[in-house]
Structure formats: structure tokens, C-alpha cells
Amino acid sequence: MFGTESSLSMFLNTLTPKFYVALTGTSSLISGLILIFEWWYFRKYGTSFIEQVSVSHLRPLLGGVDSSAPTNPTTSNGEADSSRQSVSECKVWRNPLNLFRGAEYNRYTWVTGREPLTYYDMNLSAQDHQTFFTCDSDHLRPADAIMQKAWRERNPQARISAAHEALELEDCATAFILLAEEESTTIMEAERLFKQALKAGESCYRRSHQLQHHSTQYEAQHRRDTNVLVYIKRRLAMCSRKLGRTREAAKMMRDLMKEFPLLSMFNIHENLLESLLELQNYADVQAVLAKYDDISLPKSATICYTAALLKARAVSDKFSPEAASRRGLSTAEMNAVEAIHRAVEFNPHVPKYLLEMKSLILPPEHILKRGDSEAIAYAFFHLQHWKRVEGALNLLHCTWEGSMYSSFRMIPYPLEKGHLFYPYPICTETADRELLPTVFHEVSVYPKKELPFFILFTAGLCSFTAMLALLTHQFPELMGVFAKAFLSTLFAPLNFIMEKVESFLPSSLWHQLTRI
């Protein structure tokens, strides 16, 4: 035993500072190469190579359960086809469930003193009104000519005064619309004005429908009158929904979609989905999703998260993450997790609002699909539906934050790569800052993935060994003393154990073991 110790001590004493420099330099080089490879693999595939090998190969050998949900090849291939389509990255859409300015937005301003709408958002609304509610022949009718100027006014009081002036000449549908939207202070008052607008709008629609083929001028009038009529009927349905007459609202929306099936740009089906969820008519919700959740149509958070909610509803009441980690995911649970993965990839901002990790504000009048504005608009109206389904938010929480079924890890990285949908727009954050009131709301940005542990570990190891190599080169004698002291301290417990073993065993037996 003492011979072994003396040999080890002699070996340490013979080591020169050059050896320590070479040792630490080699260690630094190896850890640096591992760091470069890990970083390249993470940038390309979004995960750590060492972590992936550990989970895929070592964990099953140790008796773990591989709970990674396999990707459905049919779904992924079908959805991937949509990525080949040319998609405008930051197109702003009209919010299908936008609130009433007078009865809701202005009331919020009166109570809090805050402006819920940005100038950019209101300017987009003014452009929408001029597009939908005006045409080149408005100058032929005095009331329409007044309203054409009213929609261009920036001052709300000037717009309201112009609407009253138009109504003094005749019953003008667009004038009633403006008053219902901006002057009414209650939903009931807005509904009353929309009913008057409906009467005037139907009269204009019937008249222009008969004359639409006579000239391009009449055709433009008919197109404008159609937009006005659809807008009025939709807002009346929304009034019924807000006043608690949900079945009536759902019927009005169904009739409107049947009467004008080609006007999909209004996204009336999203209003219908929300009403059906309030009625807990999940079979009809599934029927609507089957029609509109198609790869040829633009996706939305409402479609993706409603589909996830329906699949979560089938398993959420009995779902337990502990039980799932022991036995693995059932087929229904796997389908629910995949649906949540799909929804989170489309809009990764929604879970923070559904899980109430971030406070809600009033939704804007326009939204950016896959952005924070769309997430706010969805959660504002659909949070109650998730709460109503027992265990749905728990399943979302386990999938969103849990280490085993983390949707966060499924989000494509980097930004320009998408798994199921077209690539995530880089300009989303900039557009959302224009749509949302950043004075009192912190805009949610695309979740930035944290670096895996092994990348941080190899980076630290590389830096540490490089620093040791530098110090050994600059101060060889001092670092040699430190190295000997460190190794002596490291082997001290082993020497202590060996001495105890030697004291218990016979010297002849110990001599035979050392020879072996």
C-alpha cells in the first residue's frame, strides 16, 4: 500500500508544468468542439443532441417511459402543404368579435381614463368603413354623400353630427350604423339603432339587387348595399349574444352564412363557434370545425384552440400527469396533446392568457393572426369556455409547462421554420405594438427558447479549462503547487479507505491482491 502511495507521489512530482498546460489545453479544445457541435445541432433541430440521445436511448434502458407523442404523418403532410402557399406575413384582419365603441370601448375609457384603441387601429377601421360602406355613386344621393365625408372624419363628434344630418334627409342605413357603433352607450340602444338600419338597408338592397346588371355603377351600389346588410345582421346577432339571447344569435348567424355563403372575409363562423360553445352544443361546434378547419383556408386561433378544446374535453376530467407518466399516454390523450401542440404552434401567445399568467385587456378592432393581438381577442371571449370544461386548463398547463409533454419544445425554432404551418412571421411583434396600447400593456413576443443545459455546461467547461491552461502557462510553478494540492486532496478519502482496509485484512492476502 505504501509502495503504491510513494509511486503515485513520485509520478506527480515528475510532472512538469508543460504537462498541465497540455492537459488543460486539450480539455479546453475537446469541450470547445463539443460546444460548437451542440450549438450547431440546437440551431438546426431546436434541441440538444446529448439530451436527445439521453432521452431516446438511455431512458428506455433505465426503465423510463417514452412519452413523446408521435407526429401524425397524415396531419403533418397535409398541414405542410399550406407552407408552400404564398402567405402575406403581417396582414391585419378585422376582429370578428370586435366590441362596440360607444357601449364598450368608450365606457372603459370613462371608467379608467385609458384609451383601449390605438390610432393605428382606429385608422384601419376608418379605411374598412370607407371600403365597405361607400361607393363611387354616393354623390347621387345626398345622405350617402354626407356619410362618405363622415367616414373620413377623424373627430368622433364630427362623425356623429354628420350622421344626424344625413338622417334628417332620409333613413340612411350607414348613418344608423355609425350612431349605433359610436353614440350608443348601451347594447340595447345599439340594437335599437341597428334594427332601424336593417329596415333601411334591406330596402336599398332589394332596389340595387334588381338593377345590379344594368351598369357597373349599379353593380358597385349593390356590392356596397350587400356589405352594409351583412354588417347590420351580424352586429344584430352580436347584440343578441351580448344580451343573453344566445340561441337567437346562433340562429341569426347560421341564416346569415346561408344567405351570403361567399362572404367568408367577415369570418362569421368564428362568431357562431363562440355562441355554440356558450350553449355547450359541442356536436355543432365539431360540425362547424369540420367545414372550416381546412388547409386551404387561413387558420385562426379560434379554429385551432377550439379544436384542441374539444379533444381535451374527452380526456381532461380524468387526466392525471402522474398516472400518464407511469403508464404512458392513451390514444385519446395523445390526440388531445397533439391538438394543443398544433394550436400552440399556430399562436404561442394564447396559453399565457388562458392560464391567467398574463392579464387581459380589451381586444383591439383589428388582429394580427398568430400575434399577441389575436391571442388577446381569443382569450377575452373563450377563457370562460375553457374554464367550463373540467380539467381542460389543467391539461393545457401540463402540456404547456410540463417537462414530459411540453408544447413549448414543439414550437418551431428558429423563427423561419414551421412544422405544421407556414413560417412564423418575424414582423409580428412590430405590428402588434401598433395595434395594442403599449402604455399599459406589455406586448407578448414569440417565446424565446432557453439554451439547453448541456450547451451551457460545455460552454462553462470550455471556458474553465481554457482559463486553467492560460494560468498554467503564465504561472507554471504556482499552478503546479495548486494541482498537486488538489490531487492530494482528491485522493485523500481514497487513501484513508485503503488504510482502513489494509488494517483489517491480513498482510499476506493484501500482498496477493496488490500483485493481482
Image (cartoon, helix red, strand yellow):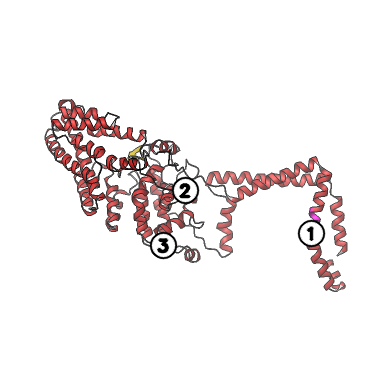
Question: Can the viewer see residue 137?
Answer: no
Residue 152 picture quarter: top left
C-alpha span from label 2 to label 3:
22 Å
Magenta span contains residue 94: no
Mark 2 or 1, closer to the camera: 1
- Residue 242, relative to residue 59: is it above or below? above
Looking at this rendering, what residue extends furthest in the top direction? 139
Mark 2 against mark 3, which lies toward the viewer?
Answer: 2
| Residue type at the position of mark 3 | Thr
Residue linked to disc 3? 331
Q: Which residue is mark 1?
A: 491
> Residue 181 appears in which quarter of the rendering?
top left
Q: Main secondary structure of the magenta part?
A: helix
Which residues fall within the magenta stretch?
A: 486-491
Tag of residue 411: 2
Relative to 340, does residue 62 appear above or below in the rendering? below
Contact, CB < 8 Å: mark 2 with mark 1? no
Image coordinates of residue 193 in percent, x first then y, are 19, 41
Q: Residue at x 85, y 54 (%)?
A: 11
